[in-house]
């Protein structure tokens, strides 16, 4: 049995009707990811209200739990529906009177309904809570005993694991140990015949050991003396003649065997020790204890014979360093499959909320639910435009550096280091600071640009879209006709290499015989690169060739040239054998020479600048660092004119930046209409 | 099944424990075996065997040792009265209340089918939460068709010797049938489609007859056969009480969820086939007969704690299915000190055309035989198989005389013996509510009863607000009325006047309140209400002076004949055999009534010792024998039979002699 669907209406940030939220969950681990205030805690709390959690068995609906709409009006009803699917025979048996039978499958609907009531004319207000089964909540009420079977284990954020693992009444550890096989095994203690050998002592049960210990304590000289002193020296002196009362020092133990065993278990605590075997209190921090605590919870859930094995964890990354986070994720996945240690374990469902790209990257994309505004977007199969192939690709390549895309307000997906390094500076220069706009750059390093952007496209575009704007920045990769010869790829127009079907580069003239035909051909190529654009994902293609070429071509020729020269001299600059301004002085001369050589032709100049990169004289990545620095200093200089600078930039970059920052230029032609529901959310 | 939740073993210590708590000082071998057996078996328990006590004892033992949190014991009975008796007696044991909660289930078979099968099926298929009530469903169905169409349809049905009352369905597609046969025409006809329209509207509004809920239950079992595994796991032990009264349909349904043959559930069925008097003759349970025929799967408890050996010997021949080799044993009554064994069990022979003196003779005989203190131990009854009056005029001299109980006492009123938990009118709910409050001294139950009545009214005039489906109806009604403070005030005032200050309800007062109540119900509807509907339900009805269930048998003074002898007096209560089933009397007189034949004529051979058992008898006679057996096994002290003279007229002297030989004392009222 697992929680397969959750519908929340009128609760906290989730409105009613159109603006209620519906989530689907997969068995196993599911992660709720999204930026702050996207509703992660609201969702976890909704599950805790509807299904209860074991830590505090009951917590009261608060006035602020009722949703307040944009007009400032509070709703009077909270409705939370949990659908539990994949019920085993035992589950069906336990919930027989509550089941729903639909299309050949059996499920359990739990409808939590809280209604705000106020007595007329008085200040008395209260909340009436009803929890019933049935699709519409028209089934019988779920009594408390039944609800307790559904109670989930809940780990709150920033918990103090050490305290939870220490001894005490009802301690978590005692509950866990109680369910461990063999905990009740062993021989009883017979006071008339105490164990004579260490082996006999070892054969005692826990209860037996405790009684043996108690038996010995009572015979300890110190105890005996103290007890006698209390009775004879003090108590007696205080009593009246007829009072019959004696003091007795004992280990407090009472009740039946079961209670006594629990009392013993409650005295135990779980701690960590290093390999020296000592138990250095305080050496292990909260992080380590947290890991231990989660391990305990999973052990307990996996072993319990009945009920819903659901573990809710808020921000498990708390106190854990990145490698531990990844390890934790692996562990949770295995635990979810019931594969920790013994085969008897049940499949545990884990729903966690996280801000950690590390954790997010540790899970298959299909197991994540992206929260965006008041909408939840499961990224599971059938819910996105990702193909099966994409999912396995992303499982390999969506690492922690890329996983921050899940938490962004906007995403720029780029093909290489050049873009990744230069775009933030460009954006800042034209007044769109990417950090300020919460835009993440994902550098796919050559391949799979579309695979990442499809994460943000819903398979059913009639459902509300993911509101995060995604800009894919792509190169056109078509050289001007003059370039191949300059780059030494061919010699003259008649070189047979032009006709080589295997050549990997393209020039403009490959697209048509005359200028209009070339233009049409290039348009087609560009449209082809954009063909998957849909919803809030758009592709921005360079006008000509590549980032560096297009930048040089449109107006940053000298800056790109300087950057290339600096990159070329990078090693010497680092060694200190050449100063940066020396290189720049040389570059200034070199650029003047180049302009003269090219007769001030932008295209030729740009080709020659770009040759630095194709000839490997300059590294694109290093040049990009210098270029970014140059742009930053330019933008910070006296009299910098933002509009003028923007006019020097290739438009596709400006458009991409603005799109990712939520300032989308009007599409042309008009894009498909956003469904009403999604529009309402925005 | 390997993961069948284990049933706790019952040990001698457990039996000693419960015997101590419940004061069971005489658990013989059979009774102990009954308590100990944990697997599937059937028990034939004779009248007065303390069956319910044993069931309660067994449940209490199991409750104490039960370990499973999600598997429980399912205890099914036939009537609400039986269910309430088990529940209340369990509630008085120290651990019994545990069984009244999840995961256990103690209720009627109908309630089981509804809760676990029919209601989940209806809910899953989008039907509204149903109101299951034959009367309400019929009333609704009468009103589906209007005007000329209804008139024509009724006329057509009349010609086919049926009426809208009999229209029902047998499958989830609502294909039309009549309660006792097929619908007269095929599906393409206009009349069939009219009938189907009635069913469709009735189903859409959630109005069903009790029996129709089994259709939905059967649908669920058919469409989701896995329910057998899950319900067997939920209820590894099923105890069915009064098994003999379970219909073929109920038995089949139960067998489809609790398979007794493959050990997926242990099913223990308790009953007495000789006391099966509620089923119609046609409906013999042949699919899964009770008691089971399997070797070692049945046991019987043949010794009664109710009566002594003389009553046992006299009743024994009437057992349709003979008990063990030794026959019915009498080892009662339990309060042995108050019992004096005697041989004054009585046959009263009365003339064919007069029942004068039958009751007096019975009463006088009692006064002669026992002193007042002994008679005060229990009630004296005179019961007959037929107790409802006949539509035709029958009087002394008529061939069918005496036909029913009223022919022994003209003031007999059959309605009075019928307790009514579902009043036919709203004012009936008010009367009941007042009675409940008077008896319990607690207003909550009565107020809830009134709220239930108000919901029924709402249902008749429109679609009740969905909140009304909840259990705490009084609270819900106040909640729904919240937005209209005047109506809330009126509702509160009504409750205050009649259920708190307990103003007696009169016809005049009631008629004043009707428009208000109609309006209140309107406020409880979602959407429009039809304020013209519900007239019958709002009609005035006199309070029923007798409400056996509410006030207990000692309280009501109706249908009681007082017989005096000198300054002594004995009360004889009249009733039907069906009504006294399960009861214990001090003395019981079986009256002769007429259904196709005079009952005394047909059973006399079993009284004279001429015949025993029901072998080879026709259905009607088997039924008479069972009824007679029930009547004869009621009393602790004395049994009597009234014989119409015609029963022995063939050879009076020989018959008298044989009866006396059996141990009967005879009083002959014939001139």
Image (tube, rainbow, N blue to C red):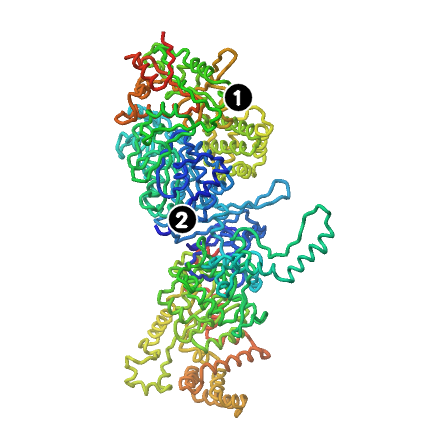
Foreground: A349 or A373? Answer: A349
Position of residue A286 measured from the top left corner of the image (x, y, whole percent) = 56, 67
Foreground: A681 or A672? Answer: A681
Residue drawn at 74 percent across, 52 percent down: A237
Foreground: B471 or A18? Answer: B471
Secondary-structure class at tag 1: helix
Instruction: Locate residue A145 relative to residue B622 in the image: left or right.
Output: right
Query: Can residue A665 be seen in the rendering of this structure?
Result: yes
Judging from the image, mark 1 belongs to the subunit labelled: B
Which corner quadrant of the image does residue A163 belong to? bottom right
Which one is earlier in the sequence, the residue at label 1 or at label 2?
2
Secondary-structure class at tag 2: loop
Instruction: Locate residue B562 relative to residue B485 in the image: left or right.
Output: left
Instruction: Locate residue A232 relative to residue A377 in the image: left or right.
Output: right
Q: Relative to residue B322, is residue A122 depicted above or below?
A: below
| Distance (Cα) linking label 1 and label 2 | 59 Å
Task: Name the residue carrying label 1.
Answer: B507
Judging from the image, mark 2 belongs to the subunit labelled: B
Dot 2, how many residues are within 10 Å of its Cα: few (below 14), some (14-19), or many (20+)? some
Q: Which quadrant holds the C terminus of chain B?
A: top left
Dot 1, how many residues are within 10 Å of its Cα: few (below 14), some (14-19), or many (20+)? few
Q: Relative to residue A90, is residue B167 depicted above or below?
A: above
How many discs mark residues in the rendered view?
2
Position of residue A647 measured from the top left corner of the image (x, y, whole percent) = 50, 75
Task: Name the residue carrying label 2.
Answer: B6
């Amino acid at each position: 049995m697992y929680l397969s669907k959750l519908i929340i209406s009128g609760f906290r940030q989730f409105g009613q009707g159109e603006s209620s939220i519906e989530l689907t969950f997969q068995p196993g681990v599911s992660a709720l990811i999204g930026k702050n205030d996207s509703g992660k805690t609201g969702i976890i709390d909704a599950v805790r209200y509807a299904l209860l959690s074991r830590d505090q068995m009951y917590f009261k609906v608060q006035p602020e739990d009722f949703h307040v709409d944009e007009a400032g009006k509070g709703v009077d009803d909270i409705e939370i529906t949990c659908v539990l699917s994949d019920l085993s025979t035992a589950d069906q048996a336990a919930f027989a009177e509550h089941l729903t039978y639909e299309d050949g499958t059996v499920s359990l609907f739990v409808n939590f309904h809280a209604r705000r009531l106020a007595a007329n004319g008085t200040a008395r207000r209260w909340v009436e809570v009803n929890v019933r089964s049935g699709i519409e909540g028209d089934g019988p009420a779920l009594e408390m005993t039944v609800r307790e079977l559904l109670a989930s284990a809940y780990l709150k954020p920033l918990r103090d694991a050490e305290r939870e693992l220490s001894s005490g009444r009802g301690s978590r550890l005692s509950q866990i140990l109680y369910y461990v096989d063999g905990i009740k095994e062993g021989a009883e203690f017979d006071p008339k015949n105490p164990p004579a050998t260490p082996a006999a002592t070892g054969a005692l049960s826990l209860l037996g050991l405790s009684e043996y210990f108690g038996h010995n304590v009572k015979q300890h000289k110190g105890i005996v003396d103290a007890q006698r002193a209390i009775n004879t020296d003090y108590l007696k002196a205080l009593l009246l003649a007829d009072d019959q009362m004696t003091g007795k020092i004992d280990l407090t133990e009472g009740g039946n065997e079961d209670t006594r065993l629990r009392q013993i278990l409650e005295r135990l605590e779980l701690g960590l020790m290093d390999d020296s075997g000592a138990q250095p209190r305080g050496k292990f921090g909260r992080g380590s204890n947290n890991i231990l605590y989660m391990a305990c919870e999973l052990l307990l859930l996996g072993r319990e014979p009945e009920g819903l094995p659901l573990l809710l964890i808020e921000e498990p990354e708390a106190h854990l360093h990145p490698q531990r986070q990844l390890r934790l994720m692996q562990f949770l996945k295995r635990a979810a499959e019931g594969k920790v240690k013994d085969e008897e374990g049940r499949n545990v469902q884990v729903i966690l909320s996280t801000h950690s790209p590390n954790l997010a990257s540790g899970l298959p994309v299909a197991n994540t639910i992206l929260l965006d505004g008041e909408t939840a977007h499961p990224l599971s199969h059938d819910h996105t435009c990702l193909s099966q192939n994409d999912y396995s690709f992303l499982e390999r390549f969506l690492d922690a550096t890329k996983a921050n895309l899940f938490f962004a307000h906007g995403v720029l997906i780029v093909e290489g280091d050049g873009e990744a390094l230069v775009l933030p500076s460009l954006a800042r220069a034209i007044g769109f600071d990417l950090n300020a706009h919460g835009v993440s750059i994902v550098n796919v390093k050559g391949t799979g640009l579309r695979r990442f952007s499809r994460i943000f496209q819903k398979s059913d575009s009639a459902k509300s879209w993911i509101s995060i704007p995604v800009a894919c920045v792509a190169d056109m990769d078509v050289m001007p006709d003059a370039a191949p010869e300059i780059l030494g790829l061919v010699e003259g127009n008649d070189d047979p290499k032009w006709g080589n079907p295997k050549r990997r580069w393209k020039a403009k003239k490959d697209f048509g015989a005359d200028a209009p035909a070339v233009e049409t051909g290039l348009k087609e190529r560009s449209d082809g690169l954009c063909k998957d654009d849909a919803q809030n994902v758009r592709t921005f293609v360079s006008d000509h060739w590549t980032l560096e070429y297009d930048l040089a071509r449109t107006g940053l020729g000298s800056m790109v040239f300087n950057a290339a020269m600096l990159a070329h001299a990078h090693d010497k600059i680092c060694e200190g054998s050449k100063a940066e301004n020396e290189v720049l002085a040389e570059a200034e001369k070199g650029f003047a020479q180049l302009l003269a050589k090219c007769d001030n032709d932008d295209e030729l100049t740009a080709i020659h600048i770009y040759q630095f990169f194709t000839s490997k004289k300059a590294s694109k990545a290093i040049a990009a660092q210098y270029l970014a620095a140059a742009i930053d200093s330019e933008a910070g200089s006296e009299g910098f004119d933002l509009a003028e600078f923007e006019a020097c930039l290739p438009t596709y970059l400006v458009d991409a930046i603005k799109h990712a920052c939520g300032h989308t230029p009007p599409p042309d032609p008009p894009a498909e209409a956003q469904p009403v529901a999604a529009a309402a959310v925005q | 099944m390997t993961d069948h939740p284990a049933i706790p073993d019952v040990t001698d210590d457990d039996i000693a424990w419960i015997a101590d708590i419940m004061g069971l000082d005489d658990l013989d071998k059979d009774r102990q075996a009954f308590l100990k057996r944990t697997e599937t078996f059937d028990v034939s328990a004779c009248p007065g065997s303390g069956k319910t006590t044993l069931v309660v004892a067994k449940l209490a033992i199991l409750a104490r040792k039960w370990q499973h949190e999600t598997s429980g014991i399912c205890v099914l009975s036939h009537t609400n009265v039986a269910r309430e008796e088990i529940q209340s007696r369990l509630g008085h044991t120290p651990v019994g209340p545990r069984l009244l909660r999840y995961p256990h289930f103690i209720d009627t078979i109908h309630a089981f089918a509804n809760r676990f099968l029919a209601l989940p099926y209806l809910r899953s298929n989008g039907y509204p939460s149903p109101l299951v009530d034959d009367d309400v469903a019929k009333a609704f169905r009468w009103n589906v068709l209007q005007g000329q169409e209804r008139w024509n349809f009724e006329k057509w049905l009349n010609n086919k010797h049926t009426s809208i009352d009999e229209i029902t369905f047998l499958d989830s597609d609502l294909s039309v049938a009549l309660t006792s046969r097929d619908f007269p025409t095929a599906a393409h006809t206009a009349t069939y489609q009219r009938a189907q329209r009635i069913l469709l509207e009735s189903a859409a509004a959630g109005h069903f007859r009790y029996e129709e809920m089994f259709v939905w239950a059967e649908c669920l079992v058919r469409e989701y056969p896995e329910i057998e595994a899950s319900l067997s796991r939920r209820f590894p032990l099923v105890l069915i009480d009064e098994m003999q009264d379970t219909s073929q349909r109920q038995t089949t349904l139960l067998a489809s969820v609790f398979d007794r043959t493959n050990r997926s559930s242990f099913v223990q069925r308790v009953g007495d086939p000789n006391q099966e008097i509620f089923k119609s003759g046609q409906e013999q349970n042949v699919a899964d007969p009770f008691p089971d025929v399997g070797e070692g799967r049945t046991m019987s408890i043949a010794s009664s704690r109710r009566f002594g050996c003389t009553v046992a010997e006299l009743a024994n021949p009437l057992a349709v299915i003979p008990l063990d080799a030794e026959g019915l044993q009498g080892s009662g009554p339990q309060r042995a000190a108050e019992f004096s064994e005697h041989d004054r069990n009585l046959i009263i022979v009365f003339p064919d055309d007069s029942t004068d003196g039958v009751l007096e003779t019975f009463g006088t005989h009692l006064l002669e035989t026992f002193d007042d203190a002994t008679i005060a131990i229990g009630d004296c009854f005179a019961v007959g198989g037929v107790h409802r009056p006949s539509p035709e005029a029958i009087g002394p001299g008529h061939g069918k005389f005496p036909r029913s109980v009223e022919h022994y006492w003209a003031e007999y009123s059959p309605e009075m013996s019928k307790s009514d938990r579902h009043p036919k009118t709203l004012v009936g709910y008010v009367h009941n509510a007042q009675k409940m409050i008077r008896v319990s001294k607690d207003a909550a139950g009565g107020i809830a009863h009134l709220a239930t009545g108000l919901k029924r009214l709402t249902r008749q005039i429109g679609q009740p607000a969905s909140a009304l489906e909840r259990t705490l109806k009084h609270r819900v009604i106040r909640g729904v009325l919240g937005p209209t403070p005047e109506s809330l005030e009126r509702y509160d005032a009504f409750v205050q006047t009649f259920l708190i200050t307990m103003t007696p309800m009169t016809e005049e007062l009631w008629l004043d309140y009707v428009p208000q109540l109609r309006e209140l119900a309107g406020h409880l509807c979602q959407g429009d209400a039809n304020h013209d509907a519900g007239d019958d339900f709002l009609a005035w009805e006199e309070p029923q002076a007798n409400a056996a269930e509410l006030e207990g048998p000692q309280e009501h003074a109706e249908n009681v004949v007082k017989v005096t002898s000198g300054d002594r007096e004995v009360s004889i209560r009249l009733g039907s055999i069906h009504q006294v089933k399960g009861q214990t009397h001090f003395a019981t007189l079986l009256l002769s009534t007429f259904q196709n034949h005079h009952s005394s004529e047909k059973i006399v051979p079993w009284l004279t010792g001429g015949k025993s058992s029901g072998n080879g008898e026709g259905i009607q006679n088997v039924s008479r024998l069972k009824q007679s057996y029930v009547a004869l096994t009621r009393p602790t002290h004395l049994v009597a039979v009234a014989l119409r003279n015609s029963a022995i007229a063939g050879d009076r002297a020989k018959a008298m002699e044989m009866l006396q030989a059996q141990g009967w004392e005879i009083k002959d009222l014939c001139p």
